[in-house]
Image (cartoon, rainbow, N blue to C red):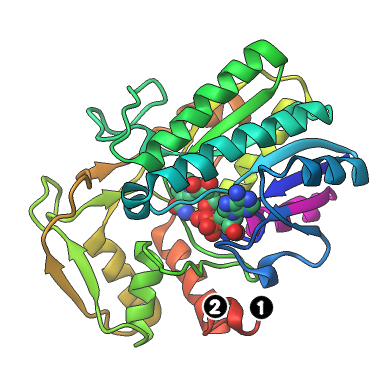
Amino acid sequence: MAVLVTGGAGYIGSAFVEQLLAAGEEVAVLDDLSRGHRAAVHPDARFYEGRTGDRDLVRRIAAEHRLDACAHFAAFAYVGESVTEPARYFDNNFAQAQVLFESLLAAGVRHVVFSSTCATYGVPTRVPIPETHPQWPINPYGWSKLFVERLLESFDRAYGLRFVSLRYFNAAGATARCGEAHTPETHLIPLVLAAAAGRREKVSVFGDDYPTEDGTAVRDYIHIEDLGEAHLLALAHLRRGGESQFLNLGNGTGYSVLEVIETARRVTCRDVPFEKVARREGDPPRLVGDATRAREVLGWTPRRPSLEAIVRSAWEWMQAHPDGYGSGA
Ligand SMILES: NC(=O)c1ccc[n+]([C@@H]2O[C@H](COP(=O)([O-])OP(=O)(O)OC[C@H]3O[C@@H](n4cnc5c(N)ncnc54)[C@H](O)[C@@H]3O)[C@@H](O)[C@H]2O)c1
């Protein structure tokens, strides 16, 4: 059987493709390259350039491979952009996903692993956040992902589409082959490392008066290989007839922005210039996930929980790929 990976030219999807291939799976990648990199797609995966909402293309992919599952990573994922361009987000992340799931069902594919997000919770009232925490997003990106969760639930009940919706906290780190090269980059670790490398002047620290140990915002960083392993387990769960699930994926440990900067200084042995600026609207003080359920249901244990190991892997990738996917990939 083969697995369709949408968004397999992107940061997390490209690393998962590597893991699928290493597990002996046949892989088809569907990506429109709107945000991804052709060079990130593993040469042993069959690449299809196009959109998730292209029914004919998904039909063709299903006809050319014996698909039994889809890992759906493809989406737009900039919170700020979703606020100024909500129509694009609801179209790309929700409407296109609906067409994708309909096309999969038409081709007899009934297993979906979906990239959801902690942004579906909005501002948490309890931390660590369990899956039962109320979901009330504070931006269109979070809503677009939450709508897909509701869509999956409805398609499960009505059409038997089984799914595992994985709510990631902050994806981070790199494999030897795949790393983070978003344009623009908004994630803290690559920004901090770019400052360490002298490729950006400094890092902005948004807010130093939060009710946290050092006043800066705390986030839960999870290595992309640990995310990938959870996807492999989710796939196995679906293939053995497991029920649909919503599961958090995080380490359950939070690190502040200043701790990330300090760790990057240690790992790179370089200075990381930063400036403290005002808080950003809608940034909660602390976002940490309770992933007990993923451990129980999937038997998942993150194997690379240390922030230092996460930052080191990202730094090594950046050193080997100074121009991102523009070189050496
Ligand atoms: N990076 C994180 O920390 C994080 C956290 C929570 C959830 N997520 C989710 O994980 C997924 C992957 O995130 P990422 O950081 O790898 O993003 P990314 O932008 O690197 O990858 C997304 C890929 O999807 C492709 N794409 C987008 N819309 C498409 C469409 N309609 N059809 C075909 N291809 C399309 C892009 O070209 C890109 O290659 C996203 O769904 C994101 O919302 C990411």
Residue positioned 55% across, 75% down in the render: 317
Magenta segment boundaries in residue numbering: 13-29
Considering only vertical position in the picture, is 41 above or below 214?
Answer: below
Name the amino acid, label 2. Answer: Gly
Residue 251 falls in image quadrant: top left
| Res. 303 visible in picture | no
Residue 299 in percent (x, y) is at 61, 31
Residue 114 belongs to the span the image colors magenta: no
Dot 2 surroundings within 10 Å: few (below 14), some, or many (20 or more)? many
For the N terminus, the image quarter is top right
Which numbered dot is residue 324?
Answer: 2
Q: Nearer the viewer, residue 49 or 125?
A: 49
Side of 155 relative to 279 (left or right)? right
Residue 323 seen from this side: yes
Identify which residue is drawn at 68% across, 22% down.
162
Residue with the mark numbered 1: 329
The quarter of the image holding the C terminus is bottom right
Asked if marks 1 and 2 touch (Cβ < 8 Å), the reply is yes
- Numbered circle sitting on residue 72: none
Badge 2 element: helix
